[in-house]
Amino acid sequence: MTTPLLAAPALRRTLGRMAREIAAANPGTGTPVLVGIQRGGVPVARRLAADLAGILGRPVACGSLDVTFYRDDLDQRAAPTVHPTEIPGDIQGRTVVLVDDVFFTGRTIRAAMDALHEFGRPSRVQLAVVIDRGHRQLPIRPDVVGQELATTLCQSVLVRCAAGGEGTDDGVFLRESPPAASPKTPATAVSLSHAS
């Protein structure tokens, strides 16, 4: 079952607020570079970059980052899909804002920071996410959050965000997954013997 949490207009307002928070967090530091984490973070980063450019009055560089080979669960994935990485220019000494759609355990962000340093050493790395759903496993916390959402491990969060502007299917949705069936413990036969 899928439940809508944010409709397209609400998501648009959320992204606008996030862009304003990014601008406020970076006064006088030059224009930050936005880097969306493949896949869900890329369209979000593009929308934020467009909003941020309108606020700052100048273009905002935006790229994408694939973290597949930096994940700590790579050995548990059969034939992982690799997506393009496009870092816009030199990030050495600049402020980079990593962007993702949903923040969960923090492991994707740890992988993203490792991957990002292959391209240079930013002066500062910030994190912006549309949804923080809890269940953090690492000491990593977003700097800019669209919405915090308490979830269970049987739920998943889907952010639909058209990269080029508001789409008719845009929104945030909560999916209920059926709980995993627990393996049944086989009955153990017990025999009682009586000594006489």
Image (spheres, rainbow, N blue to C red):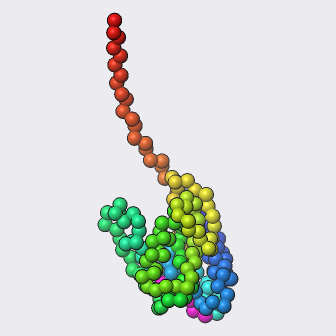
Task: Please state the horizontal and vertical placement of residue 125, each as a whole percent of the image.
Answer: 55, 80
Do we see residue 168 in this rendering? Answer: no
Q: Relative to 173, does residue 98 appear above or below in the rendering? A: below
Do we see residue 143 in this rendering? Answer: yes
The quarter of the picture where the C terminus appears is: top left
The overriding secondary structure of the stretch rendered in magenta is loop
Q: Residue at x 63, y 67 (%)?
A: 147
Task: Please state the horizontal and vertical placement of residue 84, each as a whole percent of the image.
Answer: 39, 80
Stretch of the chain drawn in magenta: 58-63
In the displayed structure image, the side of residue 32 where residue 195 appears, left or right: left
Q: Residue at x 50, y 74 (%)?
A: 41
Residue at the farthest bottom position: 58
In the displayed structure image, the side of residue 187 where residue 58 appears, left or right: right
Q: Residue at x 57, y 78 (%)?
A: 126
Task: State the count of labels.
Answer: 0
Residue at the farthest front position: 196
Task: Please state the horizontal and vertical placement of residue 10, each as a whole percent of the image.
Answer: 65, 71
